[in-house]
Image: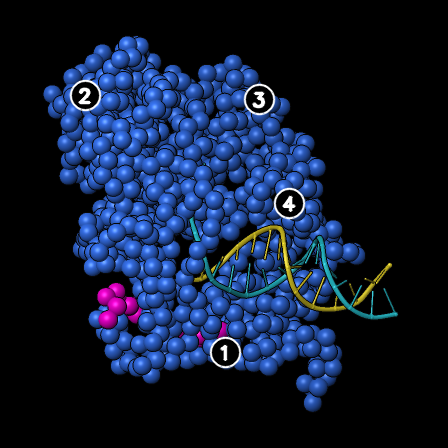
Chain colours: A blue, B yellow, C cyan
Amino acid sequence: MRKAFWLLDVNYEARDGCPEVWIWGIDREGMRILLIDRGFRPYFYCIPKEKTEPREIIEEVKSNRELMSDVVELEVCKMRYFGKPVDAVKVTYTRPEAVEEHVKWFLKTGKVDKVLEDDIRFTARYLIDRDLRPCSWYEVEVEELEGEKGVKVDAVYLVKPPFKPLDIHETPALKILAFSVVCYSTVGEPVPKRDPIVIISLITSDGKSEQFSLNGGDEKSLIKSFVDFVRGFDPDIIAGYATNSKYWDYLIERAAKNGVNLYVGRTETIPHRSVYGHMSVTGRINLDLLDYIDEFGEIKVKTLENFAEFLGISEGGEVESIDEMEFARYWDDPSKRPKLLRFSMDRARRVMSIVDKILDYSMQLANIVGIPMDYVGSAAVGFRVEWLLIREARRFGELVPKRVERRYFPYAGGMVLTPKKGLHENIAVLDFKSLYPNIMIKYNISPDTYVEPGADVPEEKVYVAPEVGHRFLKEPPGIYKKILEDLISARDELRVKLKSLAVGSPSYRLYDARQKAIKVITNAVYGYAGWLGARWYIKPVAEAATAWGRYIIRSTLELSKELGLNVIYGDTDSVFVEYDEAKVDKLLDIVRKKLGLELRPDKVYVRVLFTEAKKRYCGLLKDGRLDYVGFEIVRGDWAEAAKKVQEEVLKIILKEKSPDKARDFVVEYVSQLRERKVPLKDLVIWKSITRPIEEYKVNAPHIEAAKILIDKGWTIYPGDKVGYVIISGSGPIYKRAIPYNLASIEDVDIEYYIWKQIVPPVERILKIFGVEIKQALTHRSLRTLLDAY
DNA sequence: GCATGAAAAATACCC
DNA sequence: ACGGGTATTTTTCATGCG
């Protein structure tokens, strides 16, 4: 019998010494099914030591009776390692556990130089070798099995590979459940050892919502109700916010304390921690939205509320947010408890709304990278690229290197030009799209094409990088070139298809999400190449890409000069030039011919402002919008007040060209500030905690504020952001920083905000026009007097 | 002992 | 736990003066 299914998730089960791969899927009729593959075995490779024949290793294995009881197959394979041919011994085993037990023995034989690919996870190995990718459709021969006990699915099948990919570009209707949890503590942060869960709010993709709370009940029945609801609804995806790092652990511990089985998966098991720190819920995808917020760099303080607001989600927007520090107070106050209940429900709704916006992307990312959705979500960008490479490596016959510790040696990056200070009119921004990926393709830069310095290779067979002299074989195409070409052409095809589709239609959403996911991965390949943690790290590979990048920009600069085009600025892959249309067209043409890479017009600024600083500018577009780049406005570590004032100053200068008006605005704002007629919120400075508090070498305000929170029973982890204000008093500011929710507007040091927050960002801009803002602020009364005449 | 300026630490941006 | 280049603030430290 043939069965078509959409691949949701995969896990491994050991059954009576026989490894089983369990594939969770959804069939064409919407049945939730479990497919079991009993025919896959783990394996690894041995590279023989120099002057050792692969056969010698095989003989040695065969002479070990005990070992042979776990070995299924031994064969010699022609493979490559960093592009160089090697004869490797492939050892196929009965079960994954046996691999771990016996790998050391191979190294002890004295015949084996390297053991490789024993560190590839069994389920990932399975997906790669069976050519399966999550979130797509396949068809396979199956035989129906009796239901596995304790497994919640409509049917269970034994599969007989191969799997045939189906050309179906739609997603089955997934059942999604979003939830939010409120924990109660009167003394600082709730800890599961001590503090109960008081509210769990749930909402489902078919519109049902439910709230369980300690309102007149006990925690045991609250958690039990939650579990029953999950099992009853039987979601494919369970979504939440900070669930991987926080709420699953909390639920697990509270459930254990109350003697409740937290069986929220499709088997009778509780969630468990898995790769990259994500929580795995068997048979379902556990989606933590926190894993996706980093893709939106504009969101500075990473709260669920800010995430929803950024995505234009209005649910609960009209209701005041409640700070976690206030939860206990709200719960204990009968008049406020309803607000907390409402807030918790709103959080669940927000989770569901965000899922609606990012799920397509998440699925496409899983599909492209080739690992399950929850696994890919919590994987850092480098690991995403690496899974793609591991899959591709198999096609290349390229062995997957081990991850090794390496020492850091810096190398040169992109070239940044010093901007011409001041206001410039009519400036075109030209840039090389995907410069590094295209350079890597053009010069075949790859770990498997790199030619080591001593190697005797004729010069006509290699590309030689400028400045650094690294060499790369012109042929055959390297693994980077191959995946980059595939990614870029796939994206181009998608973008063509998108043009013929209705914006917002299901296919449009799917293809758009896919092209975005492809873009993210494409742009991450260079970063991967220069990452010390990369399995395929070779410093000259990354170094060559940037060297060619600098060469390209330098050449572009020279060509501009030859055409008499005035260059204002440039950074890595862009040049800002005066917009003389004829000359610009000519430049684009010459660059294409001479450099073989495409320089394209990106945008034209009616006006653009540069201070003397690199990486900071503000440009006015034709439609009246402004681009703010690098300035304090776009930074998360300045008080809102400073950012608002700078934004207004830039608006006035770029749109009205009136530095005097800008100055007056600042003076006026400062006088308002002096009267404390600004919300405290606008004076809060948010800064990240980047490491454990005790590892800091110098005193700093946000660290002191964090210490105050820790004293009050809160836990601060690396990655958290602390919001503080500077209060009046004497001494260095780190002694006067306190968490913002412990301060009132009367406490703040207004002079600090004026001179250290408001003034510097606007001064840098105004001084270009000869406006002395400090004087304007100190001689205010005199100035007003003079202005009167 | 203290003012001063350079260096170091820390953060967050750009591409 | 993807790269290097850069701006900026605040703290820390060395230095020279008296």
Q: Which residue is mark 1?
A: A422
Question: Outermost residue toward the bottom?
Answer: A789
In space, the residues marked 2 and 4 are separated at their CA atoms by: 55 Å
Query: Badge 3, how many Cα within 10 Å: few under 14, some, many 20+?
Result: few
User: How far from the left and from the top, in percent, is residue A374?
Assistant: 37, 34
**Mark 3 or mark 2: which is in front?**
2
Precedes in sequence: disc 3 or disc 1: 3
Name the kind of residue labelled 2 in the image: Val
CB within 8 Å, label 3 to label 1? no
The chain containing the residue under callout 4 comes to A
Circles 3 and 2 on the same subunit: yes
Q: Are marks 1 and 4 on the same chain?
A: yes
Nearer mark to the viewer, of 2 and 4: 4
For mark 4, what is the residue?
A696
Q: Gap between marks 2 and 1, in whole Å?
A: 69 Å
Q: Amino acid at mark 1?
A: Gly
Q: Does A104 appear above or below A346?
A: above
Within-10-Å neighbours for mark 4: few <14, some 14–19, many 20+: few
Q: Earlier in the sequence, mark 1 or mark 4?
A: 1
Q: Which numbered disc, 3 or 4, marks the residue closer to the eye? A: 4
- Which tag, 3 or 2, sits closer to the chain's start? 2
- Which quadrant of the rendered structure holds the C terminus of chain A? bottom right
Q: Is residue A597 magenta?
A: yes
